Image (spheres, rainbow, N blue to C red):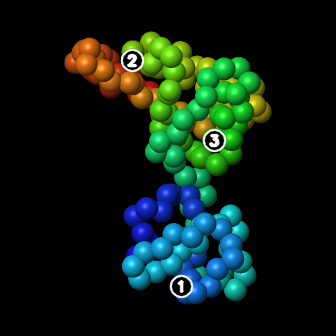
Amino acid sequence: RLPRSVAAGAVLVQRQPLFGGFGRRRSGPRSHFTMCDRVPEPFNSGRELRMRRPDDWHHHLRDGPDVLRDTVRAAARAFSRAIIMPNLVPPVTTVAAAGEYRERIEAALAASGGAPGSFTPLMTLYLTDTTTVAAVEAAAASGFI
């Protein structure tokens, strides 16, 4: 059984507790797992789980022409989809603002050489004390939030 803390998309290799030397180590009470890009041959024994295009459930891109392009390119290389957590000023509090940011992300993907549809930004709204039920309903109806 895989630990819940392991993100989808990782290549996991179950191994003995005292062996080390590659990837990031995730340990549980009974098992030790190593996350790595390629499985070293001695461990490629059929006890592995390969998920090629994971989702990132909490991703911060940066806004601005060059930095957005670079962060979108890096995210698209590693992930199929990402839940976008925008740290923008002003914050993304409306469907319109989320749509504009999504368009900038998609333009940055194209500018970085990414194929259309190769990365899906899943947009979010910043909820405040003044967020209305109508705004949440509009976000749900938008199809991209």
Instruction: Work out whether 71 lies above or below 30.
Output: above
**What is the quadrant of residue 50 in the picture?**
bottom right
Asked whether the residues under the numbered discs 1 and 3 touch, taking CB atoms below 8 Å apart as contact, a structural biologist would say no
Question: Quick one: label 2 or label 3, which is nearer the N terminus?
Answer: 3
Q: Which amino acid type is shown beneath numbered disc 2?
A: Thr
Residue 110 in sight in this render: no
| Element class at badge 2 | loop
Residue topped by disc 1: 17
Of the residues tagged 1 and 3, which is closer to the observer?
1
> Would you name the residue on which mark 3 appears?
75
Locate the C terminus and report the quarter of the image it occupies.
Answer: top left
Amino acid type, residue under disc 3 in the picture: Ala
Q: Secondary structure at mark 1?
A: loop
Q: Tag 1: residue type?
A: Pro
Q: Quadrant of residue 29?
A: bottom left
Mark 2 / mark 1, whichever is N-terminal: 1
Which residue lies at the image location 58% right of the left edge and 87% below the top edge? Answer: 18
Q: CA distance from mark 1 to mark 3?
A: 32 Å
Q: What residue is rendered at 52% in x and 39% in y? A: 59
Tell me how far mark 2 sits from mark 1, CA to CA. Answer: 47 Å
Q: Position of residue 82 (x, y in %)?
A: 52, 40
**Label 2 environment density (alpha carbons within 10 Å; few <14, some 14–19, many ≥20):** some
- Taking the view exactly as shown, the residue that stands out farthest to the left is 133
Residue under label 2: 93
Q: Earlier in the sequence, mark 1 or mark 3?
A: 1
Q: Residues within 10 Å of mark 3 (few under 14, many from 20)?
A: many
Q: CA distance from mark 2 to mark 3?
A: 23 Å
In the image, residue 51 lies at what x, y percent? Answer: 56, 61
